[in-house]
Image (cartoon, rainbow, N blue to C red):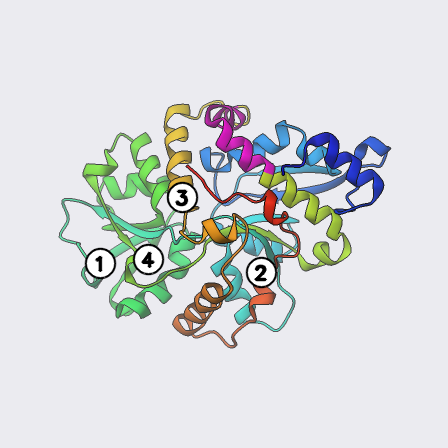
C-alpha cells in the first residue's frame, strides 16, 4: 500500500507510525543543506522531483540542494559539518570510519547497489585489461570515487601503483583530457563518463573502453544518502521523513521520466534533456539495479554482501580497523516493506 499525501499528513498529525511533524500544523520547517555527488544531471532528478512535488515540505524540511565535486567529497563535507546531508559513496565512508575511532556519518538509504567505478580509456589504445594500466598516465578529479578506490582496485588486480602516474584536474575537464590524449585513462563512474563524453562529441560506444572495477571482484555498493549521526540521533522523525520523501521522488521518477528530467532543467536550463534522460535510464538500469533489489527493495542492503564489501575495502586499503556494518549503514529509517521499490526499469 502506498501512503498518499493526505494519509501521510494524517499519520503525522496523530503521532502514529512515523511520528513526523507536519507543516500543516503550523510548525516551522527545519532547514537542511544537501551536497550532491556531481553537477545537476538526470540521475539526481528524484531529489528535485520530490522537492517540486512538495514531499520535503510535507515532512517539515526546507532543503537546499547544492552541486557536488565527487562522491568521495560529499562524504567528507558531511563529516566536516559543511552539509547536513550528502549523496555520496559509501566506500569513502568505510575508509573514513576505518581510519578513525571518532564518530563518522552514516548511510540511511542505499541507492547505488552496483559498483559503477571505472577507468575509461580510448578504444584505439592498447589498454585492454587492468594489467595494461601498468606504467600509464591516468587522471581524474581528486575527490572522484573511482580514483579514491584505485589503491584498493590496484591491490585486487595486482598492480604496482608506483609505476602509474596520476594527474589531478577539474572534473569538467575529464572527457576532454581523455579525448585529447593528455592522459591515457580517466577515473569516474561508467555512466557519468559515457554521457559526458557524448556531450563532448564522442561516441562512447565506439570511442571508449571501460576497465570496470566490478569485473575484477570488487562487488561494492556505492552512492547513498549520508547523514551526520548527530542529526540522526537528535531528529530521527525528520530523517525518516526525508527518506520517505526521496523514496517518493524515485517512484515519481519511474512513473514519468520526462517530468523527472524537467525538474533538473528547472535548476540547470542548459542541460541537454535528451542526453540526461538517457543518463537517467542508464543509471536506473545499471548502478541501481543489482539482482538483490527484488528481495531487499531500494534503500536496503544485503547484510552479508555489505559486510563483505567492508572487509574488501579494509583489506585492500590497509585501514587501521574494520568498522562494524552498523557504523556505516542503518535500516532504521527505511520505508516499510510494502512501500519500497523492488523493480526499476
**Mark 3, residue position:** 171
- Locate residue 330 relative to residue 230 in the image: left or right: left
Q: Secondary structure at mark 1?
A: loop
Nearer to us of marks 3 and 2 is 2
Q: Position of residue 23 (x, y in %)?
A: 80, 34
Report which residue position mark 4 lands on: 214
Q: Secondary structure at mark 3?
A: helix
Separation (CA) of disc 4 from disc 3: 22 Å
Residue at the location (58% across, 60% down)? 329
Callout 2: SS: loop
At mark 4, the secondary structure is: helix
Q: Residues within 10 Å of mark 1 (few under 14, many from 20)?
A: some
Q: Position of residue 309 (x, y in %)?
A: 44, 65
Kindly identify which residue carries mark 1.
136
Q: Nearer the viewer, residue 324 or 152?
A: 324
- Residue furthest front as drawn: 1
In magenta, the rendered stretch is 248-265
Of pointers 2 and 4, the one earlier in the residue sequence? 4
The residue that mark 2 highlights is: 329
Task: Examine the rendered structure and indicate whether residue 88 appears above or below residue 280.
Answer: below
Q: Earlier in the sequence, mark 4 or mark 3?
A: 3
Quarter of the image containing the C terminus?
Answer: top left
Q: Nearer the viewer, mark 4 or mark 1?
A: 4
Residue furthest right in the image = 26
Amino acid at each position: 500500500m502506498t501512503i498518499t499525501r493526505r494519509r501521510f499528513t494524517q499519520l503525522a498529525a496523530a503521532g502514529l507510525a512515523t511520528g513526523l511533524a507536519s507543516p500543516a500544523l503550523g510548525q516551522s520547517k527545519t532547514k537542511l543543506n544537501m551536497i550532491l555527488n556531481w553537477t545537476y544531471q538526470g540521475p539526481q532528478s528524484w531529489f528535485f522531483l520530490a522537492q517540486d512535488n512538495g514531499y520535503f515540505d510535507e515532512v517539515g524540511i526546507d532543503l537546499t540542494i547544492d552541486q557536488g565535486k565527487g562522491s568521495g567529497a560529499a562524504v567528507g563535507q558531511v563529516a566536516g559539518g559543511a552539509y547536513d546531508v550528502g549523496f555520496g559513496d559509501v566506500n569513502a565512508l568505510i575508509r573514513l570510519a576505518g581510519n578513525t575511532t571518532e564518530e563518522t556519518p552514516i548511510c540511511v538509504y542505499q541507492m547505488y547497489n552496483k559498483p559503477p567505478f571505472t577507468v575509461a580509456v580510448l578504444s584505439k589504445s592498447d589498454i585492454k585489461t587492468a594489467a595494461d594500466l601498468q606504467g600509464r598516465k591516468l587522471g581524474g578529479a581528486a575527490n572522484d570515487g573511482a580514483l579514491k578506490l584505485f589503491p584498493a582496485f590496484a591491490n585486487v588486480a595486482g598492480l604496482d601503483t608506483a609505476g602509474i602516474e596520476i594527474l589531478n584536474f577539474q572534473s569538467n575537464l575529464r572527457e576532454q583530457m581523455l579525448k585529447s590524449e593528455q592522459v591515457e585513462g580517466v577515473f569516474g563512474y561508467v555512466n557519468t563518463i559515457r554521457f559526458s563524453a557524448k556531450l563532448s562529441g564522442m561516441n562512447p560506444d565506439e570511442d571508449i573502453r571501460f576497465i570496470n572495477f566490478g569485473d575484477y571482484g570488487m562487488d561494492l555498493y556505492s552512492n547513498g544518502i549520508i547523514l551526520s549521526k548527530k542529526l540522526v540521533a537528535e531528529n530521527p522523525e525528520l530523517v525518516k521523513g526525508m527518506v520517505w520523501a526521496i523514496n517518493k521522488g524515485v517512484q515519481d521518477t519511474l512513473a514519468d521520466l520526462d517530468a523527472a528530467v524537467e525538474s533538473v532543467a528547472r535548476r540547470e536550463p542548459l542541460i541537454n534533456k535528451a542526453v540526461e534522460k538517457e543518463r537517467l535510464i542508464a543509471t536506473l538500469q545499471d548502478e541501481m539495479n543489482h539482482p538483490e533489489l527484488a528481495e531487499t527493495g531500494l534503500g536496503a542492503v544485503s547484510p552479508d554482501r555489505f559486510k563483505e564489501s567492508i572487509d574488501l575495502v579494509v583489506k585492500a586499503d590497509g585501514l587501521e580497523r574494520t568498522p562494524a556494518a552498523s557504523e556505516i549503514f542503518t535500516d532504521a529509517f527505511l520505508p516499510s516493506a510494502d512501500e519500497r521499490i523492488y523493480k526499476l526499469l
